[in-house]
Image (cartoon, rainbow, N blue to C red):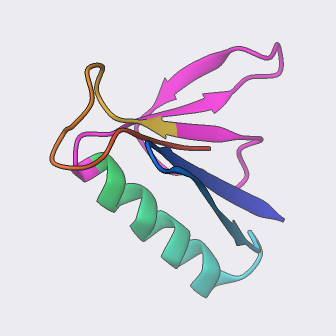
Amino acid sequence: MGIQIVIDNSGDSRFEFDPTDEDAVAKATERFKELTGLGYTAAERTASGRSRKVTEFDPTANRGAVHAAAGGRVNAPAASIC
């Protein structure tokens, strides 16, 4: 099961999706594009436990996050997508 975790100043939201389901992947991809289009920065967790910036959605990624720019708002609440 894939998961996107969106963290903002009100807490976090989790969006699970089946990476083998084309419709579910399309929705997750659209959510990723929407948030990064608002200025959020996406990152994924590497095998060593560190994070690295990504610019395209990978439904097979281990875990990721999308963060708003430092300092708070970028046309949206500060947030992360994992």
Q: Give the range drawn in magenta.
A: 37-65
Residue at 32% in and 47% down: 36
From the viewer's perspective, is residue 49 above or below residue 59?
Answer: above
Residue at 70% in and 14% down: 50
From the viewer's perspective, is residue 48 above or below residue 63?
Answer: above
**Residue 48 on image: x %, y %:** 82, 13
Residue at 30% in and 19% down: 70
* Residue 55 shown left or right of residue 49 in the figure: left
Residue at 24% in and 51% down: 37
From the viewer's perspective, is residue 31 above or below residue 63?
Answer: below
Task: Find out whether residue 7 is within the magenta segment.
Answer: no
| The quarter of the displayed image where residue 74 is located | top left
* Residue 63 shown left or right of residue 22 in the figure: right
Q: Which of the two residues, 27 or 73, is positioned nearer the viewer here? A: 73
Task: Find out whether residue 64 is within the magenta segment.
Answer: yes
* Residue 65 shown left or right of residue 21 in the figure: left
**Residue 73 on image: x %, y %:** 21, 37
| The quarter of the displayed image where residue 44 is located | top right
| Residue extending farthest bottom | 23
* Residue 46 shown left or right of residue 55 in the figure: right
**Residue 72 on image: x %, y %:** 27, 30
**Residue 22 on image: x %, y %:** 63, 82
**Quadrant location of the C terminus in the rendered image:** top right
| Residue extending farthest front | 10
Q: How many labels does the image show?
A: 0
**Quadrant location of the N terminus in the rendered image:** bottom right
